[in-house]
Image: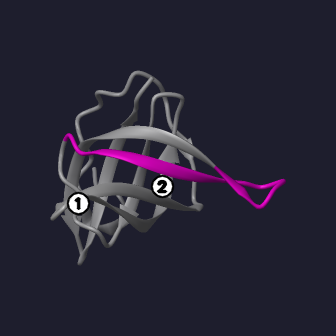
Amino acid sequence: MKEPGGMKARAEKRQSARSAYELPVQFELSSVASPGLIPLRRKGVGVDISEHGIGLFTDYPLKKNEVLKVFFPLSSHRATLPVFARVAWAASVEKRFRVGMQFLH
């Protein structure tokens, strides 16, 4: 079975079913540079979401086990909800990256 974008379906390891989530999200990670950490803010598009995690596409090459702060847009306000997540897996798909992330509690 293939997913959109030509990716083969991954072995199901999720704790709960995911629902479609096709909205833009921003995420922040830290880059190590002299004299310290520099926050980098990047964009992605959600694919699916559950109470335990989110899948997204991004142009930024994320790596397994990176911890990000993901900003979800709140529809009723001009604000975002920040949530920490760990990259569970990442794969290159047609010049972009498909990423599965697990929310941290």
In this view, the mark in front (1 or 2): 1
Q: Which residue lies furthest to the bottom in this view?
A: 95
Using residue 11 as the reference point, say whether residue 99 is left or right of it. right
* Residue at the (57%, 59%) spot, across then down: 22
Split into 4 quadrants, where in the image is the C terminus?
A: top left
Under mark 1, the amino acid is Ser
Q: Which mark is residue 104?
A: none
Sequence order check, earlier mark of 1 and 2: 1
Give whichever of 88, 15 is nearer the camera.
Answer: 88
Label ID, residue 47:
2
Residue placed under numbered mark 1 in the picture:
31
Residue 57 sits inside the magenta stretch? no
In the image, the segment drawn in magenta is: 65-80
Q: Residue at point 17% right, 64% down?
A: 33
Where is residue 23, by image quadrant? bottom right
Mark 2 belongs to which amino acid? Val
Question: What's the colour scheme?
Answer: one colour
As drawn, the residue found furthest toward the front would be 35
Q: Residue at x 20, y 40 (%)?
A: 65
Q: Residue at x 81, y 56 (%)?
A: 77
Q: Where is residue 27 in the image (x, y as percent from the top left)?
A: 44, 57
Quarter of the rendering containing residue 97: bottom left
Residue toward you, 3 or 54: 54
- In the rendered image, residue 101, in percent from the top left (x then y), is placed at 35, 42
Type of secondary structure dominating the magenta stretch: strand
Q: Is mark 1 on a helix, strand or loop?
A: strand
